[in-house]
Image (cartoon, rainbow, N blue to C red):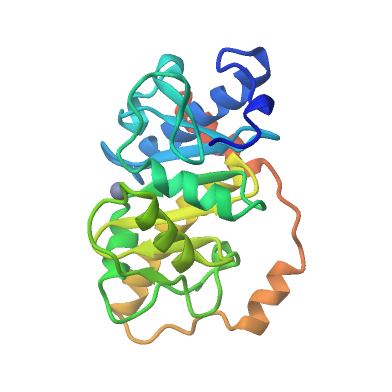
Amino acid sequence: MSANRANVPAFDSSDLKELKEKLITACHILDHEGVTDGYGHVSVRVPGADAFITIANVSPGCVTMDRLIMQDFDGNYLGGAKTPPNEWPIHACILKARPDVESVAHTHSKWSTIFSVLPIKLKPMHHYGKFLSADGPPVYQGIGLVRTVERGNDLTAALGNGPVVLMRAHGDAVVGASIEQVIERTTRLAMLGEWNHLALLHGEPKYLTAEELEVYNADQRFPMRGWEYYVSRLNGRK
Ligand SMILES: [Zn+2]
């Protein structure tokens, strides 16, 4: 049974238009920035309802308005394109368990994948990583696609209350309070993975400590500058 079904606006409602457009832009950014490839997806919670919108079974770089789908947290179809992404439970289970989360990205980022299989952690070494804990994100050890609610719940448990969970031999799931924040975190996670890799070639990096991260986290403003920059790159100003 889907809760709050009465609160779910019609998929084609004008209430959802802006959210859907932003979701499409977010997917195009991850594709353009090379974080996603032919796979991966971003979702957004439908405000006030136990439902979410994500991309239908399509590559993030190819998504259009008619290739979005709305589902409830049990995976029931609520509108849009007919075919959900294989790993829809990633979004449903996290959004159900984390009312603080408005948007989720799942990618097969090479940097997250590399650090998901190494005995070393992907740690914050620049203030771009201030959303991470000093010892880096946890790693979900389950192997295979997250195609069931059971596996979605296991992934959600591994994520805990944090912003990121790496998925062993697979990629990552990143959450945030908005689509813009999820895109900033997902792109920065990939940058930090690359920078960790480069720094480690030269020895043991002097990572940011928990106390030092607090200095950066004292400022929780979220300027739209990063989002604006990525959108401008999409629009051809390379
Ligand atoms: Zn996947």
Instruction: Residue at 30% x, 46% y: name it.
Output: 147
Q: From the viewer's side, name the closer residue of 220 and 198.
A: 220
User: Which residue is situated farthest in the front direction here?
Assistant: 1
Residue 79 in sight from this viewpoint: yes
Instruction: Residue at 62% x, 29% y: name it.
Output: 5
Side of 84 where 101 appears, left or right: right
Residue 86 drawn above or below residue 165: above
Q: Quadrant of residue 203?
A: bottom left
Assign the C terminus to one quadrant of the image.
top left
Q: Quadrant of residue 69?
A: top left
Side of 227 where 32 appears, left or right: left
Q: Position of residue 129 (x, y in %)?
A: 54, 65
Side of 72 where 36 appears, left or right: left
Q: Position of residue 160 (x, y in %)?
A: 53, 67
Residue 184 in sight from this viewpoint: no
Q: From the viewer's side, name the closer residue of 196 and 37.
A: 37
| Total labels drawn | 0
Instruction: Residue at 47% x, 66% y: name it.
Output: 157
Residue 175 drawn above or below residue 217: above
Q: Position of residue 63 (x, y in %)?
A: 38, 24
Q: Position of residue 213 (x, y in %)?
A: 64, 75
Instruction: Residue at 28% x, 56% y: name it.
Output: 110
